[in-house]
């Protein structure tokens, strides 16, 4: 088994908000970490144009990944225009074939923003299709086996109707919360944007508050929640439990 993990999210900072603590735990156990976003976050500013903010946010994302000695990839889609279509799906399949991950993390299938939901669908299909030899993509070969796929919590643990989405497992990240915070702080350009557009004054505090909520469910200080993709053909073993042992609390 190759110790390679790949987090594919919609926008820069999504990974840090949802699963950076778990990635840090894997990194400490010898896993190679890769972070990818479908977009560069090109609409994440009220002052800068798309080219300027895109350049800044990609640098921020790369700096964050570097904290875990990781790689960062941007698939160069546009904010709010992530579509479930052939070209975007082929990009996602190509990424998985290039990285060859054993574990993949994706957004929640149900979330407050459609970009997240479409990214989740793209990743689900790409994990399944990466091994199909009849899908030809220049510079890549089919990749098997199907990766272990985990869906992170949606923002604030709620769907678009405000209903709670409960994870099937919570991971104790007490030992890596400071790393998670350091990675999130790399995305400095987003503080002013979120304050103006989302009325969120300090999203680092919000991140820690939600991590505390998940931590309370397993009697620790900070946690991150996940659900494992268990559809037909997907791996059924909880490899995070195997790798992280007592730090993983299965709730089902």
Image: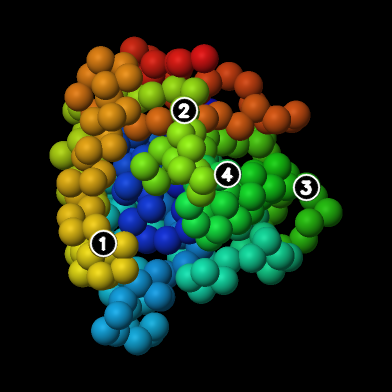
User: Mark 1 to mark 3: distance in Å?
Assistant: 45 Å
User: Image quadrant of residue 234?
Assistant: top right
First along the sequence among labels 4 and 3: 4
The secondary structure type at the circle numbered 1 is loop
User: Mark 4 to mark 2: distance in Å?
Assistant: 12 Å
User: Mark 4 to mark 3: distance in Å?
Assistant: 23 Å
162 vs 203: above or below: above
User: Image quadrant of residue 169?
Assistant: top left
Residue at (48% x, 70% y) in the render: 79
Picture coordinates of residue 84, whole percent (x, y)? 68, 61
Picture coordinates of residue 156, whole percent (x, y)? 36, 42
Residue at (60% x, 56% y) in the render: 118
The secondary structure type at the circle numbered 4 is loop
The secondary structure type at the circle numbered 2 is loop
First along the sequence among labels 1 and 3: 3
Closer to us: 41 or 144: 41
User: Mark 1 to mark 2: distance in Å?
Assistant: 26 Å
Which residue corresponds to mark 4? 109
Which residue corresponds to mark 1? 199
First along the sequence among labels 4 and 2: 4
């Amino acid at each position: 088994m190759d110790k390679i993990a790949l987090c594919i999210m919609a926008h820069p900072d999504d990974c840090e908000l949802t699963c950076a603590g778990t990635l840090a735990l894997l990194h400490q156990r010898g896993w190679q970490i890769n972070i990818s976003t479908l977009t560069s976050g090109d609409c994440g500013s009220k002052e800068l144009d798309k080219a300027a903010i895109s350049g800044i946010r990609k640098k921020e994302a790369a700096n964050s990944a570097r904290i875990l000695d990781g790689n960062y990839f941007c698939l160069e889609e546009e904010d709010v225009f992530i579509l479930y279509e052939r070209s975007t799906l082929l990009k996602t399949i190509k990424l998985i074939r290039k990285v060859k991950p054993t574990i993949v993390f994706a957004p929640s299938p149900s979330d407050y923003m459609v970009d997240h939901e479409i990214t989740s669908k793209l990743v689900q299909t790409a994990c399944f299709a990466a091994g199909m030899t009849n899908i030809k993509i220049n510079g890549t070969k089919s990749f098997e086996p199907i990766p272990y796929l985990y869906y992170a919590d949606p923002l604030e643990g709620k769907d678009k109707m405000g209903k709670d989405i409960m994870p099937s497992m919570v991971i104790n990240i007490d030992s890596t919360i400071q790393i998670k915070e350091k990675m999130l702080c790399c995305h400095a350009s987003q503080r002013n944007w979120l304050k103006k557009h989302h009325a969120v004054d300090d999203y680092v505090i919000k991140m820690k508050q939600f991590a505390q909520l998940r931590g309370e469910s397993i009697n620790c200080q900070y946690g991150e929640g996940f659900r494992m993709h268990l559809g037909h053909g997907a791996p059924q073993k909880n490899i995070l439990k195997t790798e992280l042992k007592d730090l993983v609390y299965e709730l089902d």
